[in-house]
Amino acid sequence: MTRLPDGVSSPRAKLVYLYLATHGAVCEDDLCDGLSMKRISLYAILKTLREAGHVEKADGRYALA
């Protein structure tokens, strides 16, 4: 079972975090399609998760840190 880190309180941020926890490293297109989320919304969520140290980006793919 994946435990959400403290500070991840937004429902959409939780959704992105859990998606990454279950799918591993994915590109933005996979996140948009898999979560039915607009890219502009996804960027803001990923930025917040990256700044908090929960998500990292490498080679164009996002994954849990």
Image (cartoon, grey):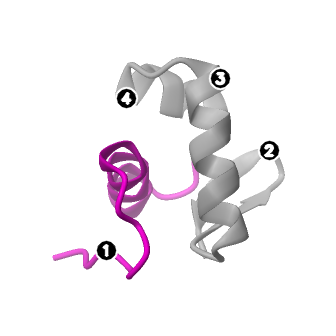
Report how far apart the C-alphas of labels 2 and 3 lie in the structure. Answer: 16 Å
Q: Earlier in the sequence, mark 1 or mark 4?
A: 1
Q: Secondary structure at mark 1?
A: loop
Q: Which mark is residue 4?
A: 1
Q: Which residue is mark 3?
A: 40
2 vs 4, front mark:
4
Mark 2 near mark 4, Cβ–Cβ under 8 Å?
no
Report how far apart the C-alphas of labels 2 and 4 lie in the structure. Answer: 18 Å
Above or below: residue 8 compared with residue 35: below
1 vs 4, front mark:
1
- The amino acid type, in three-letter code, at marker 2 is Gly
Q: Is residue 56 magenta?
A: no
Q: Secondary structure at mark 2?
A: loop
Residue 52: which quarter of the image? Answer: bottom right
Identity of the residue furthest to the left in this view? 1
Q: Secondary structure at mark 3?
A: helix
Percent position of residue 29, x then y: 60, 24
**Chain part drawn in magenta:** 1-27
* Dot 1 crowding, Cα within 10 Å, few <14, some 14–19, many 20+: few
Q: Is residue 9 magenta?
A: yes
Considering depth in this image, is 11 or 20 the residue closer to the camera? 11
Considering depth in this image, is 41 or 23 the residue closer to the camera? 41
Report how far apart the C-alphas of labels 1 and 4 lie in the structure. Answer: 18 Å
Q: Earlier in the sequence, mark 2 or mark 1?
A: 1
Q: Which residue is mark 4?
A: 35
* Dot 4 crowding, Cα within 10 Å, few <14, some 14–19, many 20+: some
Above or below: residue 44 compared with residue 33: below
Mark 1 near mark 4, Cβ–Cβ under 8 Å?
no
3 vs 4, front mark:
3
**On the rendered structure, is 13 left or right of 4?**
right
Asked if residue 27 shows in the view, the reply is no
